[in-house]
Image (cartoon, rainbow, N blue to C red):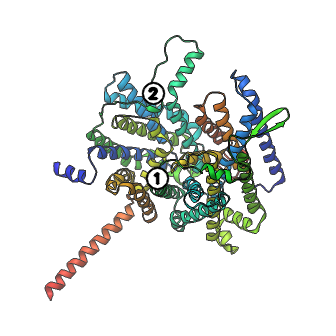
């Protein structure tokens, strides 16, 4: 999973820094190169960071399941959508204070994740079914989840009520941003955006800590390395799988709530757009790498924001896939991944 | 015949749906070819889009007759498969799947914005004339006459099936099977791995283009939105649920999975839900898919055992 080799670690940090510098440079230079007028480039940088942090958080669940089980869980986006609905609906229907929506959605997302594992993955795993069948079965689980949401919540967009947003101590309205002067540039950030970034990065650091530093994380890495060996070491392989799905679901649930806070339009089909984005994110960073997923999320957000900013909004959707295509051809292990012997 | 079609229509399978079922059977067969060679490629939705748009533009804007237009769509898909396949087929497994999904999405977005790209080129090159509208963006091309007939599709499926059966026993098919089992061993036996993989990819792309051409002339309207990630995975689902251990598996899968939501239509808002549940049950309890020869053998054995038991019961009754 993670590079324990200090040289590799240094390399991945270096790549991250370089890519981030590149993004920042692009923000200022791209408009001039293409001779387009863009208002406040620093504004785009802040947008990249907070949108990217939601993408990264979402994609982490994908990356986690892929690194432990080696399968793509296509129902992850449906769990994400359910997390958003759990958050919004607990406020609308049961008047639950908005602070509790995040832990509630994480718990709900985690439970849905474990259920998906029990229904869609566990029976196939027991039979040693090929990965391709597991992909299709996760697709079936996704269809079931989306249709259930449609039956329960309808298809009209939902949002956190404005009044509940004002419950937050800093009045999290998008209309009242802080202005920060730094290095002569003016960054305008709303408190909501700041809290989204803080929550997302806090969760990502927690996960990184869990996987890299704790005993459970070590057990997870052993299972990822070889399931038979893990069984011999008396690690409960099934338990680790369920834990993985719980963690991935909880991350998806958290991302769902943050998404619902950021964009006031949650429908049962919200997840479908994210499914592909998440896939792009984890491939750009390196399949199964946590740090890679973070970097990938920021990159995809950067592509989207800058393509729109320079007036080629139609390129917005194509650019991440072009990048994905090129990365797969020239660096299949992703930007931060390690090359393995049995690589693509 | 009238009786059969009436019965089918009564369970929701009218002529349009049956035609669509056969179109999807062709698409399922197109992905079978790459899967047979062990290539996990999802690119066929993109080739379907190319075949569909090329053939529809030819019949609508250039007054081509139906058949040559369909064949042109097929050839176009095959030609585009050459530069895509050469670099992409170096990848394996999930990486190949994701790269081909990338291709599908890029194709979709290119078709979606084709007119904008042309217009941009016109202004950059300072051309005076009005840029043409070809793909018509997200609205797609509308008012396409329905020219796809069930007979054409049945004939196509039969021809393709013949090729599939012959393929298994041919040099080409055996080479693909060897590549599926182990690429390195196949290469060491003197099989030109790159050649056979690309050949299978291109042939699959041509079949997908053909299916796309048929589907374009069936639904009266084509939009870029219907050839994305979802379609790519649907095509894979047809062939996996049908079973990839036999050539007729994908056909069965394509037919069954297209018919399923139509048959479930009376359930109204529960259609989608039950469809997903059935998909889950299929994949959990039919490991080899619908067309798994082992499944049918065991069904036949159980049937004959049942018949045997019934006969035995009858003779026992008669004896008493």
Dot 1: what SS? loop
Q: Residue at x 73, y 48 (%)?
A: A197
Dot 2: what SS? loop
Relative image position of residue B143 (x, y in whole percent)? 34, 30
Relative image position of residue A118 (x, y in whole percent)? 54, 67
Relative image position of residue A281 (x, y in whole percent)? 65, 46
Report whether B11 appears left or right of A127. Answer: left
In front here: A14 or B73? A14
Q: CA distance from mark 1 to mark 2?
A: 31 Å
Query: How many callouts does the rendering have?
Result: 2
Relative image position of residue B9 (x, y in whole percent)? 24, 50
* Figure check: B63 above or below B298: above
Q: Quadrant of residue B212?
A: top left
List the residue tagged with mark 1: A154
Q: Residues within 10 Å of mark 2 (few under 14, many from 20)?
A: some
* Figure check: B62 above or below B89: above
List the residue tagged with mark 2: B136
Report whether B249 appears left or right of A208. Answer: left
**Closer to us: mark 1 or mark 2?**
1
Do tag 1 and tag 2 residues touch (Cβ < 8 Å)? no
Q: Chain of mark 1?
A: A
């Amino acid at each position: 999973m993670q590079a324990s080799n200090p040289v590799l670690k240094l390399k991945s940090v270096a790549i991250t820094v370089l890519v981030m510098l590149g993004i920042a440079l692009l923000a200022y230079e791209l408009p001039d190169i293409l001779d387009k007028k863009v208002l406040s480039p620093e504004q785009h940088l802040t947008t990249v960071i907070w949108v990217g942090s939601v993408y990264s958080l979402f994609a982490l669940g994908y990356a986690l399941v892929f690194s432990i089980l080696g399968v793509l869980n296509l129902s992850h986006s449906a769990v994400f959508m359910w997390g958003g609905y759990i958050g919004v609906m607990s406020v609308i229907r049961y008047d639950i204070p908005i602070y509790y929506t995040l832990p509630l959605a994480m718990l709900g997302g985690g439970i849905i994740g474990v259920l998906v594992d029990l229904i869609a993955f566990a029976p196939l795993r027991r039979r040693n079914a090929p990965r391709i069948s597991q992909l299709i079965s996760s697709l079936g689980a996704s269809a079931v989840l989306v249709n259930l949401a449609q039956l329960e919540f309808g298809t009209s967009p939902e949002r956190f009520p404005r009044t509940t947003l004002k419950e937050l101590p800093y009045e999290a309205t998008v209309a009242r941003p802080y202005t920060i002067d730094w290095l002569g540039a003016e960054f305008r950030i709303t408190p909501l955006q700041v809290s989204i970034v803080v929550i997302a990065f806090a969760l990502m650091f927690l996960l990184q800590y869990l996987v890299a530093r704790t005993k459970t994380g070590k057990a997870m890495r052993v299972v990822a390395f070889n399931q038979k060996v893990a069984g011999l070491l008396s690690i409960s392989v099934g338990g680790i799988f369920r834990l993985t799905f719980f963690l991935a679901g909880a991350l998806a649930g958290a991302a769902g709530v943050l998404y619902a806070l950021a964009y006031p339009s949650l429908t049962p089909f919200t997840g479908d757009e994210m499914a592909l984005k998440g896939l792009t994110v984890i491939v750009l960073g390196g399949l199964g790498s946590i740090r890679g997923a973070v970097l990938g999320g920021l990159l995809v957000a950067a592509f989207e924001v800058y393509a729109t900013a320079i007036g080629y909004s139609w390129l917005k959707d194509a650019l991440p896939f072009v990048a994905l295509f090129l990365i797969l051809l020239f660096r299949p292990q992703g930007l931060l991944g390690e090359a393995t012997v049995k690589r693509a | 015949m009238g009786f059969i079609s009436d019965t089918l229509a009564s369970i929701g399978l009218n002529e349009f749906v049956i035609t669509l079922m056969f179109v999807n059977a062709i698409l399922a067969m197109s992905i079978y070819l790459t899967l047979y060679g062990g290539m996990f490629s999802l690119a066929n939705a993109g080739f379907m889009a190319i075949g569909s748009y090329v053939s529809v533009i030819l019949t609508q804007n250039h007054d081509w007759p139906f058949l040559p237009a369909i064949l042109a769509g097929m050839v176009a898909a095959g030609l585009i498969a050459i530069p895509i396949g050469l670099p992409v087929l170096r990848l394996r497994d999930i990486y190949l799947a994701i790269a081909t999904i990338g291709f599908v999405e890029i194709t979709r977005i290119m078709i979606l914005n084709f007119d904008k790209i042309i217009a941009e080129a016109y202004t950059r090159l300072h051309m005076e004339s009005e840029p043409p509208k070809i793909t018509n963006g997200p609205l797609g091309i509308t008012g396409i006459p329905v020219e796809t007939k069930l007979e054409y599709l049945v004939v196509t499926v039969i021809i393709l099936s013949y090729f599939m059966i012959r393929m298994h026993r041919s040099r080409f098919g055996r080479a693909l099977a060897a590549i599926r089992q182990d690429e390195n061993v196949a290469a060491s036996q003197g099989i030109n791995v790159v050649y056979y993989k690309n050949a299978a990819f291109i042939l699959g792309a041509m079949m997908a283009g053909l299916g796309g051409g048929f589907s374009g002339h069936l639904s009266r309207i084509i939009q870029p939105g219907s050839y994305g990630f979802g379609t790519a995975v649907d095509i894979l689902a047809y062939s996996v649920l049908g079973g990839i251990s036999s050539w007729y598996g994908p056909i069965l899968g394509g037919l069954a999975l297209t018919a399923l939501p139509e048959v479930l239509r009376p359930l109204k808002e529960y259609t989608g839900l039950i469809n997903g549940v059935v998909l889950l049950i299929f994949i959990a309890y039919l490991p080899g898919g619908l067309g798994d020869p082992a499944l049918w053998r065991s069904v036949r054995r159980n049937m004959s055992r049942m018949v045997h038991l019934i006969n035995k019961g009858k003779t026992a009754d008669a004896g008493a």
